[in-house]
Amino acid sequence: MTPKLIAIAGGTGTIGSWIVRALHTSPLYKPIILSRAISTHSSNTSDTTTIASSTDPSTKETYEIETRYVDYTSIDSLTTSLTGIHAVISALLIPSEKMIEYQLNLLNASIAAGVTRFAPSEFALSQEVHKQVDIDYAKIVVWDAVRAAVQRGDIDAAAFPCGMFMNYLAVGFAEGESERRRKSALAGFSEGALMFHPSPGEGGAPWVEVPLTEEGSFPDVTMTDIRDIGKFIVAALGIEEPWGGRELGMAGETRNMVETITIMQEVLVEDVEVRTITRKELQQRLDGLAQSDILPRIDVQYTMACGRGGSVVEGVLNRLCSEVKPVTVREFMEEAWGR
C-alpha cells in the first residue's frame, strides 16, 4: 500500500516535529514538511530536512524528510505544493495577524488541491476557552472558517485541543544526568514556567501557583506530553468516520491540582510550596499589565482560564483511539525528576 502524504505546516517546530516523528514511524503515512520560503529556497521548491529521532542528546539517530517550501501569502503557491496531499496538519505558531492570513490561505489551498482532511493549529485549549485569552482570537476566526468549509462539504476537518502541555512540569534546572533527563522530558519545549515550578535548584523549594475556582477549591487540569500529540494525530488520521468539524480532544491525564502537587512532592522527595491566588487577585495582576506586555498577559489569562476549568479537555481521541497510551503525570515526573 502506498503511504498517504500528510503535510505538516510548521513541521520543524516543537509540536510539528513530534507529529512528523510519529508519522515517520507509521507505514500508512509519509510526512511532508511545509516551510516558509527563504532566500536559499524559493516557493514551490523542495529539499530534505534532517529530523532527530529524539531530543535526548545521547540518541544520535536521524532521518530525512521532504520539505516543500511555500509562500503562505499565496493560495496559488500553496495549492501547487499541496498536490497529492491527503491531509494537512497545521502546527504554525505565528503570534500576529499573519496567523489568520496564513491559516486561511492554507485552508483554501487545501480545498483547491483536493486535500481530504485539515486541522488548524490548535493543540492547547478548547475553542470556547479561547474567548478568555486575547491572543487566541485568531484561533476563533480560523476555526469559524474551518467549520464553515466543513458544513459546505468542501473538506473534512477537526481541532485537536490537548489542555496544558505536561512538559511545563520539566521546566527548571538540574545538574549532571538529571539535567539530561530533564531536557529529554522537555522534548524541545522552550517556554518559561507557568503555575508549576518544580525545579529544586532555583534557590528555594519547588512551588505551584494555584488559581482557585469561584468556590475557592483547586481546579482540575488536563495535561498532555507534547510527544504524545503526534501519536494521537496518527491515530486520528486512521479514524474512518468523518472528523466532521468536531473538537477531537486528547488528554494525557486529567487530575485535580491537589493530586498533581502530591505527585510532585513524592517524586521530588521534597515539600512543594502551594501559593493560592484568587480570581480577583489575578484580575488585578492583569490590570497592572500594559497591552504591549503580550507574554505576561497570556500567562495571567491562561492561569485565570485554568481557575475557571478551562484547562480541562474531553479525551475524545482517548476513547476513539484506545491504542494510544499517553504518558501520565506520575510517569512524566519520574522521567524528568526521578532520583
Image: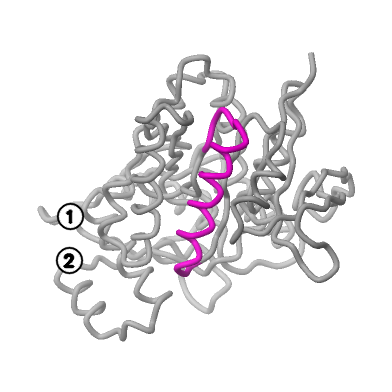
> SS class of the residue under badge 1?
loop
Other residues around mark 1 within 10 Å, as few (<14) / some (14–19) / many (≥20): some
Q: Amino acid at mark 1?
A: Thr
Labels 1 and 2 touching (C-beta < 8 A): no
What residue is shown at x 42% (from left), y 42% (from top)? 161
| Above or below, comparing residue 300 to residue 311 in the picture | below
Quadrant of residue 289 within the rendered picture: bottom left
Q: Amino acid at mark 2?
A: Arg
> SS class of the residue under badge 2?
helix
First reached walking from the N terminus: tag 1 or tag 2: 1
Between 333 and 253, the one lying in front of the other is 253
Quadrant of residue 274 within the rendered picture: bottom left
| Above or below, comparing residue 9 to residue 292 in the picture | above
The reply to whether the magenta stretch includes residue 120 is no
Q: Main secondary structure of the magenta part?
A: helix
Other residues around mark 2 within 10 Å, as few (<14) / some (14–19) / many (≥20): some
| Above or below, comparing residue 133 to residue 259 in the picture | below
Please provide percent x and percent y for residue 84: 72, 31
Q: CA distance from mark 1 to mark 2?
A: 8 Å
Residue located farthest toward the left when viewing the structure as drawn? 215
What residue is shown at x 56% (from left), y 63% (from top)? 171
Q: Disc 2 designates what residue?
A: 279
What residue is shown at x 59% (from left), y 61% (from top)? 73
Which range of residues does the magenta coloring cover?
A: 95-118
Q: Is residue 14 visible?
A: yes
Quarter of the image that includes the N terminus? top right
For residue 321, the mark is: none
Between 270 and 25, the one lying in front of the other is 25
Residue 45 lies left or right of residue 23; in this view the side is right
Quadrant of residue 102 within the rendered picture: bottom right
Please provide percent x and percent y for residue 178: 70, 59
Q: Disc 1 designates what residue?
A: 213
